[in-house]
Image (tube, rainbow, N blue to C red):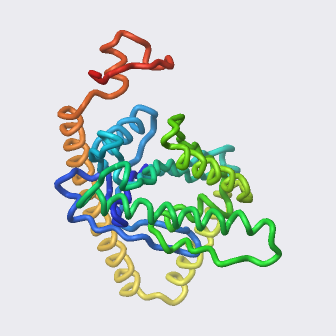
Amino acid sequence: VSYLEIYNENLRDLLVPLDDRAKNQLTVHYHPKIGTYVPGLTECLVTKYSEVNRMIDYGQKTRSVAATSMNATSSRSHCIFSFHLEKETGEGKLKQTVRAHVNLVDLAGSERQAKTNATGDRLKEGAMINQSLSTLATVINKLASVGSKSTKDFVPFRNSKLTHLLQESLSGNSKTVMVAAISPAKSNTDETMSTLRFAQTCKKIQTRVVKNQDSRQQVINDLKAEIERLRADLASGATGGLRDSVNQELSEETQALRKKLEEEQATIEKWEHQRALALDDMALTMEEIANEMGVDPNTPQLINISTD
């Protein structure tokens, strides 16, 4: 899993301790085979729901929020929680791996300065949020119109970090679901209608889901063929000195990889300890709130934790 936020068009790693985030400069890259990715972004291995929930809880409590006239804890950034799933099926030589990549996106809401009364940094943050949402709306409109035209229009995915990261989720081999937050207040009628029109446009996007399945047997056969080729080269014309040179090179590479693995493991353990300490100093989790209230955390409920 990985967790990042887009704050003023800058990427921040939410799974890195707060003291180390300034050192971690992230950028978006695109590869024709693996798609969009962020080099240097922290990826944590998880095997159960409690571990995933702990990562989400930590990132949620350390994301950028600030008070405005409309919301005391207004989100000042877009957040993307991503996880890669792998499932093995079959046995023995017939093993196959099914892969999936899921993006959970929390978009900051559009803002009007007349209502938020934002100034200074808050005004700049609101402008950057609106700019990225406008780019997202442009991309959505372009993708929605593709299905009704014989020719394809240029889709400006790279005009924003948000749309660049979500390129695979919005087009191609994907299935996209959007939940729109609207307000029943009369003063927010314009925003509500705009959100509903945006959601209606999203429904027109056409994507095609393909099963991401890899046959492990093919990979094994390729590796076996490569090993046999190397053995034949060594046995036919390779001298003892060449064999020793190959062995020494492999030994050096193994030691370098082992050292790198130990360093990364030490960093992971350090960050995990810092995350645990940080969570102890922060607000209660939803599970802890449920325990304090004496209710089942798996039962839907409404809890008023505001003094007013």
Image vertical order of residue 61 relative to residue 266, above or below: above
Image vertical order of residue 294 relative to residue 103, above or below: above
Q: Nearer the viewer, residue 81 or 259?
A: 81
What residue do we see at 46% from left, 64% from top? Answer: 132
Q: Is residue 149 left or right of residue 222?
A: right
Q: Is residue 156 left or right of residue 79?
A: right
Q: Position of residue 62 (x, y in %)?
A: 27, 45
Q: Position of residue 53 (x, y in %)?
A: 40, 35
Q: Position of residue 61 (x, y in %)?
A: 29, 41
Image vertical order of residue 293 relative to residue 271, above or below: above
What residue do we see at 58% from left, 43% from top? Answer: 179
Q: Position of residue 237 (x, y in %)?
A: 51, 90
Q: Nearer the viewer, residue 33 or 174?
A: 174
- Number of labelled discs? 0
In terms of image quadrants, where is residue 182? Answer: top right
What residue do we see at 34% from left, 12% from top? Answer: 293
Task: Work out which quarter of the rendered image holds the C terminus and state it.
Answer: top left
